[in-house]
Image (cartoon, rainbow, N blue to C red):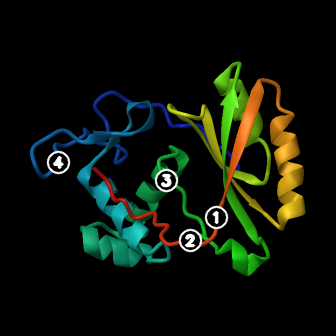
């Protein structure tokens, strides 16, 4: 997946290109990456797409009070700014990936550097720097246990990685992406 750099923020502006309005409750609009303001309409568009990522721009426009073209432009700005992605979420088991794990990693060096090296591995789809027992958590989707062992060897081979602990997923009970906007 290609990383799109965040669009530079213009002080006092929103993704609509107009001054950032106050939200419904009178507070200022939420700030996203690099200070980009998310106004009420952009938040509503995000929420519409979280409910149904295939919803048409015309249907979204009707729900939020904008034209189809205005919705299309706002969605493109949200994607370009790195605020959201529109992707197909799949079930790895249905695609032949029989093993999913979370790996807790302890490091003795630069966490950012280790995180970047791990993020470059195709099989790793989630990397976070954490506090607590582990310095990093990574999620791995792989074909089988042999594939997992190969990935673990590569993870353990990253300089500064001192130990790992693997948590094998036995059954997924909940995974959502609809946390809305604030």
Crowding around mark 3 (Cα neighbors within 10 Å: few <14, some 14 to 19, many 20+) is some
State the SS at label 2. Answer: loop
The residue wearing badge 2 is: 172
Q: Are marks 2 and 3 in contact (CB under 8 Å)?
A: no
Q: Which marked residue is nearer to the observer: mark 2 or mark 3?
A: 2
Question: In the displayed structure, would residue 100 be above or below residue 32?
Answer: below
State the SS at label 4. Answer: loop
Q: Are marks 1 and 2 in contact (CB under 8 Å)?
A: yes
* Residue ID at (87%, 34%): 157
* Residue ID at (38%, 31%): 35
* Residue ID at (71%, 25%): 113
Q: Quadrant of residue 181?
A: bottom left
Q: Quadrant of residue 14?
A: top left
Q: Where residue 120 appears, x then y in whole percent? A: 77, 41
The residue wearing badge 4 is: 23
Inter-mark Cα distance, 2 to 3: 24 Å
Q: Which mark is residue 169?
A: 1
Crowding around mark 2 (Cα neighbors within 10 Å: few <14, some 14 to 19, many 20+) is few
Question: In the displayed structure, would residue 105 be above or below residue 38?
Answer: above
Horizontal arrangement in the rendering, residue 27 relative to residue 2 (left or right): left
* Residue ID at (33%, 55%): 42
- Earlier residue among tags 2 and 4: 4
Most foreground residue, 47 or 113: 113
- Earlier residue among tags 2 and 3: 3
The residue wearing badge 3 is: 84
């Amino acid at each position: 997946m290609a990383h799109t750099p965040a669009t530079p923020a213009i002080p006092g502006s929103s993704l609509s290109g107009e001054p950032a309005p106050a939200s419904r409750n009178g507070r200022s609009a939420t700030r996203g990456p690099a200070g980009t303001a998310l106004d009420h309409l952009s938040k509503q568009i995000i929420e519409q797409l979280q409910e149904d990522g295939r919803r048409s721009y015309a249907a979204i426009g009707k729900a939020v009070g904008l034209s189809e073209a205005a919705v299309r432009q706002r969605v493109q700005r949200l994607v370009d700014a790195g605020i959201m992605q529109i992707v197909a979420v799949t079930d790895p088991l249905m695609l032949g990936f029989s093993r999913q794990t979370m790996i807790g990693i302890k490091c003795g060096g630069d966490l950012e550097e280790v995180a970047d090296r791990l993020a470059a591995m195709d099989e790793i789809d989630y990397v976070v720097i954490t506090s607590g027992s582990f310095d990093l958590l990574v999620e791995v989707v792989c074909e089988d246990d042999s594939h997992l062992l190969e990935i673990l060897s590569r993870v353990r081979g990253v300089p500064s990685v001192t130990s790992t602990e693997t948590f094998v997923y036995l059954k997924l009970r909940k995974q959502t992406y609809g946390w809305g906007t604030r």
